[in-house]
Image (cartoon, helix red, strand yellow):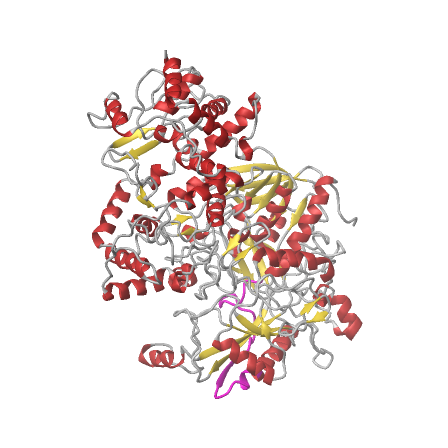
Amino acid sequence: MAKRERPVDVVLVGFGWTAAIIAQELTDAGVQVLALERGEFRDTVPDFATDTIQDELRYAVRKQIFESPERETLTFRNSADQTALPMRHLGSFLPAAGVGGAGVHWNGQCWRFLPQDFEIRTHTEQRYGRKFIPESMNLQDWGVTYDELEPHYDRFEYLCGVSGTAGNIGGVKQAGGNPFEGARKRGYPLPPLKRCASTVLFDKAAREAGFDPFPCPAANASKPYRNPLGVQMGQCTYCGYCEWFGCGNYSKASPQTTILPVLLKKANFSYRTRCNVTRVNTDNTGKRATGVTYVDVDGNEIEQPAGMVVLCAFAQHNVHLLLLSKIGTPYDPTTGRGVVGRNYAYQITSSVDVFQKEILNPFMGAGALGQGVDNFNGDNFDHGPLGFIGGGYIALWNTGGRPILQHYLPKDAPTWGSGWKKVMHDNYLTATSIATHGSVMSYRSNYLDLDPTWRDDYGNPLLRLTFDFQPNEHAMSDYLTDQATKIAQAIPDATHHVKKRDGHYSIVPYQTTHNTGGAAMGADPTTSVVNRYLQSWDVPNLFVMGASVFPQNAGYNPTGTVGALTFWAAEAMKRYLKNPGPLVSA
Amino acid sequence: MTARIGIAITLSLGFAGLCAAGAVAANASTSARTSPGPHASVQHGRYLVRAGDCMACHTASNGAPYAGGRAVPTPFGTIYSTNITPDPDTGIGRWDGDDFYRAMHQGIARDGHRLYPAFPYPWFTKLSRDDVRDIKAYLDTRARVRQRDIAPKLPWPLSVRGAMAAWDAMYFDAGTYRADPGKSAQWNRGAYLVRGVGHCSACHGDKNFAGAVDAKHPLGGGFAEHVFAPALTGGKRDGLGKWSEQDIVDYLGTGRNAITTAAGPMAEVVSQSTRYLSEPDLRAIAVYLKSLPAPPQDDIAEADAAVMRHGAALYLDNCEGCHLRGGTGEPGAFPPLRNSSAIQARQPDTLIATILRGDAVPATDADPTGLAMPAFDKRLDDGDIAALTTYIRQAWGNHAGVVSRADVKDLREKLHRNPN
């Protein structure tokens, strides 16, 4: 018999970015909010203190601050005719565990999606015709527009103190910014980060190749910053330990550096750590959530009643929880019916390593210190003759020059011994790399469901991921890589190593933690799990946050859009709390 | 009987003094009132209780507010703060206004025993009778907590309360604050707060062998727990000589200003006490402190070049990320080290303790981020910290004494023995 806790107005599953925003917004609206976090409490000091955090072996290699697959994992296969097996080491993507979530270890690459990204089906049909869209592709509009999200992008950027150069303010193009971006109400809160030798190199080469480079938007503070909540950030020191590390200098936006100092003082907010939510409970109609059940650190099963439940865990964990809780119709790949687990997508990346003569001092880096071009993102270019859908940015990110993992060696370099040492010595200060960051569409054959064989610590079926890159994505990524190569070729006295993304998707090498979908948002309940306000179509007092609601993935890092959608949903939740019921009639 | 003593002492100070104090107290907007109703009296009492930071000492960690029991380490032994809740048996519930005034004014408890001057009656004696009445009125509204006081752990003869009579005779003059007619009302209000309820010199003053503050130089800097509270006099290097009135107002009101941020025990004072003071009172304090002259400066020995090189390298590796090149810091976020009076204080203990233990700026409503510095005690050894602190005290135009390895070793051991 599960122990029953005292009811709360709102329970949040997870305590990362989306939970911190929702908690801040809803406690301001006067309700009692509780966050349940499976990991530990963490804060800048002592957990990410500058005297200990810059330890690449501990954090980047041994993956100290991520979720541990011994406790929590999924099974994987490329296609439905294979047998999925558990992922026993983190590789392709790195979900977090602990307060702050992946908001602690992200790089701070904080983008807005393009206006057409949100209406991609309508836009594609209008420009290229219905037949342009492959049969197997579940291309969907989001049910929300860029213009509706703009004020919420703005709120997230000002919360985070994003450093950048605007490209389009109120429809007026701005010199030095991204000419392709959607119109923004005002510029970024902070000027762009300082340039480094490699981004200057990229900028020049991209211009020579005929493209339009701009400083990538960075949630790494270029100057001391005080956000609208009064929370302070310090100036980035370019230490090069953003990605996969917590920031010791209060410079990278995270829940800890932007919201928690205010939120944790509130009498109507509380959180519990080491509490693993295993079910969303519903009443006997199945149409109303009554709270959640979680397992605490001692293995006790505890029921937490709540008036409203918000799933704020990492993308696939939200989907896992919906499936385990039997909320919404699970997706059936044979019939194409059902929605939960449908629309899983990812991103496709490639790179061109550049070996040139100029000393670049790569160790002076920041997670989002980059120069990029958006000429080949979304539908910023004519896809007609190319025959594929989607795109991505091309950027040179100088995230750091960490000794173990962040170096670039020529293609046939020795992999050990004195030969390796020599090429390492010869290239460390001068080599760099241009990355492409491509979108991935949703397909009938890519989805999430419950594994029939493998179970987790709590006896629940593991989530099963069935995913592979499709011809559309390979064609797009190859095209993007060719454009990146043109930039590399414009760098003087350089040789290149072009690393295309060939073949099947592999879950082993790290690519990106931009897993999306499985609980898609949309206007049609037969193709989406949540409505345009991220409210469950089936259970109106249940909301789902994060990238799990993306109907397909765009060619940008997702956090900016996740933040904007969260503020957007928080506004809707406030309306819901005053007048409970479906916010959109099905 | 007790009432008569209290009155007698007040009379002996003369009516002029009392009236002047009343005028000073009435200058600040928060205390401007004619005949206070009970509510106004309680509200004003709360203001003064915060100004005196009474709760900080009279509340044990995780203990009930004002129930006492917090260990107050003194150079002579440990004294425990007392229960000042209105509980009749273990608190001050049976005390009347005269009893309370005698304790505040003369350092004598209701039963006649002499209080140890860890209770700041040498400062509270300056308070006007009305202010003391309001403090009691506020304390009377607090929740009663039944909690017996803990006997002090002091060696003989200090363990004999009567010995305090001798101390009082030598070092204590009871007397309400007398306004200086040659100064402005604002200056007098500031002096009243600093020298009275604020009891600033309890930390910022040099103490003699008996623990009494040097009456001639009450704000010339002094030890507080394990750190050195810098001078509040007009020295340009280790005092407030380079601070503007606004800098002082900002610091006390928010824990930070253009020059530095509060740290250590002062961070607690800001977050529990000074940030609640009214702007006119903060400004009055600033006006008073800015009027204090600079003391003569000691001769400073130049550090060895090799030590400075070692210190500079350590600074680059450990400190520069936040405090930046040249010790400029980020005003409002990470304290500047250049030109800092805390860094250039006569004694380096605050700087050493901060490096050993780490610290955080106070989180306030206006500045909710308690920006923190990690502890470096495991990363840097005594010699490293001596070189680093010497460097910080003599780089970028700073000018303060060399720190020895022994200075660091002693403080590290002291902090290890008594982490509070």
Residue at 64% from the left image edge and 53% from the top image edge: A566
Residue B71 vertical position relative to residue A182 in the rendered view, above or below: above
Return the x and y of residue B349 as percentages of the image width and height: 29, 48
Side (left or right) of A323 relative to A69: right
Magenta-drawn stretch, dominant element (helix, strand or loop):
loop
Which residue ends up furthest to the front in the rendered image?
Answer: B182
Residue at 59% from the left image edge and 67% from the top image edge: A164
Side (left or right) of A485 relative to B205: right
Which residue ends up furthest to the bottom in the rendered image?
Answer: A493
Please state, as top left, top right, bottom left or bottom right, where the C terminus of chain B lies in the image.
top left
Magenta stretch?
A: A487-514
Residue A413, by quadrant, is bottom left
Residue A584 vertical position relative to residue B313 in the rendered view, above or below: above
Side (left or right) of A296 relative to A388: left
Return the x and y of residue A116 as percentages of the image width and height: 72, 67
Return the x and y of residue B189 as percentages of the image width and height: 47, 36
| Residue B300 sits inside the magenta stretch | no
Residue A39 vertical position relative to residue A223 in the rendered view, above or below: above
Nearer the observer, A554 or B163? B163
Return the x and y of residue A559 as percentages of the image width and height: 59, 60
Residue B150, by quadrant, is top left
Residue at 35% from the left image edge and 54% from the top image edge: B237
Q: Could one spot residue A299 in this view of the protein?
A: no
